[in-house]
Amino acid sequence: MGDTLWGTPAIRAIKKHNPNAYLSVLTSPMGKQLLLHNPYIDQLITIKEPNLRKKIQLIKADVSLIFHISQRVMMPLSYLSNATHIIGSAGINKGLDSILTQCVEQNQEHEIARRLRLVEKMGAPSSGSEMEIFLTEDERKKVAKFPRPILAIHPGAKDRFKQYPPHLFAKAAKNFQGTILITGGKEEVALCEQVAKELPGSISLAGKLSLRALAALIESVDLFLTNDTGPMHIAFAMKTKTIALFGPTDPNLCGPYEYENATILRAPPTCTPCLRKKCQEPFCMRQIKPSKIAEAF
């Protein structure tokens, strides 16, 4: 989610610089959901589509920009797009930097800034760093209405080493006066129910919302408490007041960027080197005191 949303300021910059350009985005099915109804995009293509190679070869691209690749197939597909220029950052292309016609050296910078620097190479100046999700009014109307104020807690994360302990989430929120919602995906139902069980009266919505419905819900709440994970970036895009918990990852590189409505609470890594995906018990996250979180409400 973050990798997709970090690209929205750069996409906007391209289209505002050259409104007559035809802009296609090759993305994942999840990325497509986040980019639906984006007025700066003319065509969305997913890597799961049938006859993808033929569809890519039919595109006569002048410029192909590589923002992020989670699979090696993205680079060859970009090559097959017949682009005159293929622009990307050095060292993050799974050994396929040679496909790039313009290889931009990396800086120690936020991922939004890196993408904006890539589009600057094709002459498109930044039009702001705000991430965007374009919801329809119908999508907003379908969000269930809850009594305010509303605190939404997202206790999950794609990687275990980024997860704050569920009982500490509950401890931080125990004195919140208002509606408490627990959000998560289908695979996080048990985790969310664990938090909800320790917060009498709270409501678990885990596995019950589509991605766009989740975005509409996050937009509607008063406060979003989350780990460093995809829905955190949705909260930033929806301009929701957010408390984000960081441990091994660096918020300067992947946290809020030029966004004032977020409070970052970070615990320094306890292991040297950090075990990252091999970590089974993120002790570093335990250093964030629930009382410190409650103070930020």
Image (cartoon, grey):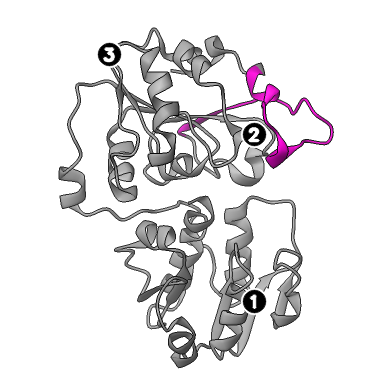
Separation (CA) of disc 2 from disc 1? 32 Å
> For the residue carrying disc 3, how many other residues have a C-alpha within 10 Å: few (<14), some (14-19), or many (20+)?
few
Q: In percent of the image, x 58 and y 73: which residue is there? A: 74
Is 63 situated left or right of 224 in this image? Answer: right
The label nearer to you, 3 versus 1, is 3
Q: Quadrant of residue 292?
A: top right
Mark identifier at residue 161: 2
Q: Are marks 2 and 3 in contact (CB under 8 Å)?
A: no
- Residue located beneath label 3 in the image: 201
The magenta segment is 261-286
Observer-nearest residue: 276 or 114? Answer: 276
Q: In percent of the image, x 46 and y 51: which residue is there? A: 130
- Residue located beneath label 1 in the image: 87
Is 97 situated left or right of 138 in this image? Answer: right
Task: Locate residue 257, reporting x and y percent.
Answer: 55, 45
The three-letter code of the residue at mark 3 reads Gly
> For the residue carrying disc 1, how many other residues have a C-alpha within 10 Å: few (<14), some (14-19), or many (20+)?
many
Q: In percent of the image, x 38 and y 78: which residue is there? A: 19
Observer-nearest residue: 76 or 40? Answer: 76
Task: Locate residue 86, reporting x and y percent.
Answer: 63, 81
Separation (CA) of disc 2 from disc 3? 29 Å
Residue at the extreme right of the image, as rendered: 272
> For the residue carrying disc 2, how many other residues have a C-alpha within 10 Å: few (<14), some (14-19), or many (20+)?
many
The secondary structure type at the circle numbered 2 is: helix
Queried whether the magenta region covers residue 273, the answer comes back as yes
Q: In percent of the image, x 53 and y 87: which residue is there? A: 81
